[in-house]
Image: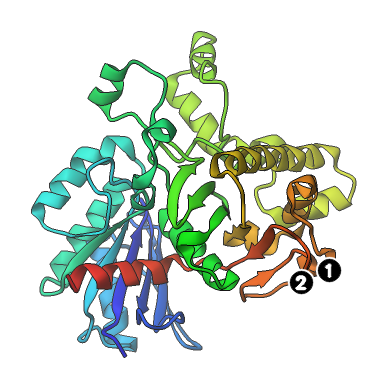
Amino acid sequence: MAQPILLLNCGSSSIKYQLLDPDQASPLAVGLVQRIGQEVSTIDHEVGEAEFHDERPFADHTEAVAAVVKMFTDHGPSLEGVGAVGHRTVHGGSTFVESVLIDEGVVAKLEELSGLAPLHNPPAIAGIRAAQAVLPEVPHVAVFDTAFFATLPAEAYTYAIDTAVAEKFGIRKYGFHGTSHSYVSRKAAEYLGRPIEDTKIIVCHLGNGASISAVDGGVAVDTSMGLTPLQGLVMGTRSGDVDPGLHAFLVRNGMSIDEVDTLLNKQSGMGGLCGYTDMRDVKSQIAAGDERTKLALDIYVHRLVSYIGSYIAILGGLDAIVFTAGIGENADHVRGPVVRRLAHLGLILDEEANLQRSKQAREISTADSPVKVLVIPTNEELEMAQETLEVISR
């Protein structure tokens, strides 16, 4: 067994973590810290079938990470043999185009980049500093959501605004969910039994946050998220694409810019359209005859089909479309309408296969479908572990 890697995914008030052997898909331990900075914080730690829970206040990420280490000390597995700590870091800007070993210079640059991801990078930095404090002798690696999309051509990542303004503020398309898109596109090529260099694949990462990518020969050539994770598809609470003039229109009509930002990030998407962000609720409401919810799903599907169609044109062909993440892996009522609307482009749905639930990679297109339609569970943590191992092995 390789030395296990501790993986940390720090949010503003939470920490998701796993201890993972890079050679295995199954984690040795998983856990979640919630409500950091509140009166009562919680930590849940799972080792195999055993579950451990604690409630007490964690004032900040330093205390929360210390609690994570204590859980490992008290309930195992031991962290003594850990080879490294991998930190999910959302935004690397144009500076970090691959995973890097963390030093003070890297942390300083991440602080400079926080303006591009004010909700994501500061918690990641806090987690890095906290983990370095309790595990000082272990190498720490930053794994970036944006890195996989560093290969986008200029025509894809450049916005049509004044170039001096764009350069001054670092305004361009960066893309997100890169670890998932990287992992899934590679697994899709393996499933097809072809070298990834000879594949044209579209990956639909559909969760509460959602993005889509065009991957040509293993290289990302376009993606839906942009400067921020707000651009692109309809999501749980995010609007995705809107008229850029909407912001100014709403401000001129009495909303503050912060209110507009909250509206588009937290009060829009499926939640704003129909009041439901869980696709299971959406399915049941449509079955009950809720027309508002049906329209919301139609809008969700329409946006997704529009992106897929444009990416087929950009790729100049298509070998497979892949659905992944919570909705992509489980929502047959999302996959079905999307694939049916693309039948004229060579995607033929196997209706029965689409209804099957499984945690395994599988095909939901017919045997004679010119373009394969796959469902592949993502494993961002495994991708992070392998990236971390690669960095410390250099």
Tag 1 and tag 2, C-beta contact below 8 Å: yes
Q: What quarter of the picture does the C terminus occupy?
A: bottom left
Q: Nearer the viewer, residue 251 or 207?
A: 207
Label 1, secondary structure: give it: helix
Would residue 44 be seen by someone viewing this image from the given angle? Answer: no
Residue at 64% from the left image edge and 57% from the top image edge: 327
Disc ID at residue 10: none
Q: How is the image coloured?
A: rainbow
Residue 281 is situated, as x and y percent measured from the top left of the image, at: 74, 54
Residue at 25% from the left image edge and 25% from the top image edge: 167
**Residue found at the far top of this picture:** 252
Q: What quarter of the picture does the N terminus occupy?
A: bottom left
Q: Nearer the viewer, residue 367 or 131?
A: 367
Residue 279 is situated, as x and y percent measured from the top left of the image, at: 70, 54
The residue that disc 1 covers is 352
Disc 1 marks which amino acid? Glu
Left or right position of 323 against 158:
right
Name the quadrant containing residue 268.
Answer: top right
Q: Nearer the viewer, residue 321 or 179?
A: 321
Whether 253 is drawn above or below 341: the answer is above
Name the quadrant containing residue 161.
Answer: top left
Disc ID at residue 356: 2
**Residue found at the far right of this picture:** 289
